[in-house]
Image (tube, rainbow, N blue to C red):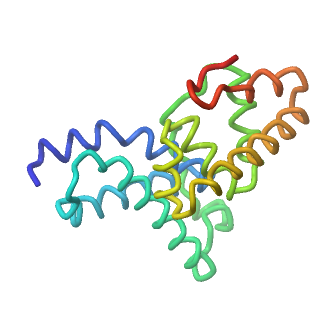
Amino acid sequence: MPAEVFTQLVDTHYTSLYRFALSLTKNTSDACDLTQQTFFIWARKGDQLREATKAKSWLFTTLYREFLRGRRRSDQVRALEDLPPSEADVAAPEVDVVAGMDATLVVEALQEVDEVYRVPLTLFYLEELSYREIAETVEVPIGTVMSRLSRGKAQLRAALARKDSGLAAKVVSFDTKTRKQL
């Protein structure tokens, strides 16, 4: 694969993949590692993809599978938070600096949503994947994606209500077809 094509792919998808990884791992270092691992796998196997238009879906699916593989191995590895302060590296700066307090509350509330519901919420609202693309990424039927989105929105509303009662209704009232606030 030519270097220019690879660089363009990274430039196009790095931020959205990193945000998805961050929503899964809840740790900036792990999110960076997971995103880099995804692009490393692409560099090795990406030329096997028949349709170049499916690269985004392939990258998200690969990142999610690597996350699951890493979780299965996590019993054998100590987490960064478990290391003594002298051994822990200084945390990397956030790639996306949250602009306002409302956004911070939403991100914090999203982290309280169960992972099984947080993944489809993140992919649908933040990464703007279709139901079909989400279903392919997490390897579940479309109906399951739709029910997880519904339950995830309910959990997000509850989490937001605990944090700021006025914000909950505004933030999660999206039209699922246009992804715009009502």
Residue at the (60%, 26%) spot, across then down:
98
User: Residue placed farthest to the top in the image?
Assistant: 182
Q: Is residue 26 left or right of residue 4?
A: right
Does residue 166 lie above or below 144 as drawn? Answer: above
Q: Quadrant of residue 97?
A: top right
Percent position (x, y) of residue 158? 87, 39
Does residue 145 lie above or below 97 as drawn? Answer: below
State the quadrant of the C terminus.
top right
Percent position (x, y) of residue 30? 52, 57
Q: How many marks?
A: 0
Front in this rendered view, residue 44 or 176: 176
State the quadrant of the N terminus.
bottom left
User: Residue placed farthest to the bottom in the image?
Assistant: 76
Q: Is residue 160 left or right of residue 17?
A: right
Q: Is residue 99 left or right of residue 56?
A: right
Residue at the (60%, 63%) spot, across then down:
80
Front in this rendered view, residue 47 or 67: 47
Percent position (x, y) of residue 42? 27, 59
User: Residue placed farthest to the front in the image?
Assistant: 143
Residue at the (12%, 47%) spot, across then down:
3
Percent position (x, y) of residue 94? 53, 37
Residue at the (22%, 52%) spot, across then down:
51
